[in-house]
Each structure stands twice: as structure tokens, then as C-alpha cells.
Image: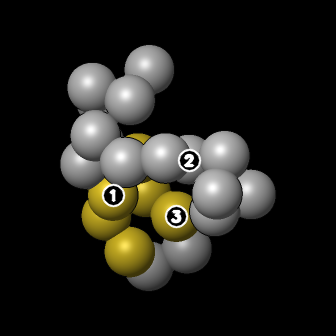
Amino acid sequence: METQPFVVGNKRCTSCRVLSYL
């Protein structure tokens, strides 16, 4: 799941820890 680009708010996180943003 960390291999796909995740959009958190207005920031694009690529291969990043989404759990840290939640």
C-alpha cells in the first residue's frame, strides 16, 4: 500500500507512511 501515491489533504505522499498522517 505504501507503493501507491496517497493524497493527504493537499499533500501528495508517494511511498510514505499513511498511518502517520491519519
16 to 4, vertically: above or below: below
Q: Earlier in the sequence, mark 3 or mark 2?
A: 3
Q: Considering the numbered disc 3 on the image, is that residue within a helix, a strand or a loop?
A: strand
Q: Position of residue 14 (x, y in %)?
A: 25, 48
Q: Mark 1 touching mark 3, by CB under 8 A? A: yes
From the viewer's perspective, is residue 20 above or below residue 3?
A: below
Look at label 3 and name its amino acid.
Val
* Badge 3 vs badge 2, beta-carbon distance below 8 Å: yes
Q: Decide: marks 2, 1 in contact (CB < 8 A)?
A: yes
Amino acid, disc 2: Val
Q: Residue 7's quadrant in the figure?
A: bottom left
Identity of the amino acid at label 1?
Cys
**What crowding class fits label 2: few (fewer than 14 Cα within 10 Å), some (14-19), or many (20 or more)?**
some
**In the displayed structure, would residue 21 be above or below residue 19?**
below
Q: Could you tell me residue 16's position as x and y percent? A: 37, 48
Q: Which residue corresponds to the image point at 44% horizontal and 20% vertical from the top-left?
A: 1
Return the mark for residue 8.
3
Q: CA distance from mark 1 to mark 3?
A: 7 Å
Quickly name the residue at label 1: 13
From the image, tell me which residue sits under label 2.
Answer: 18
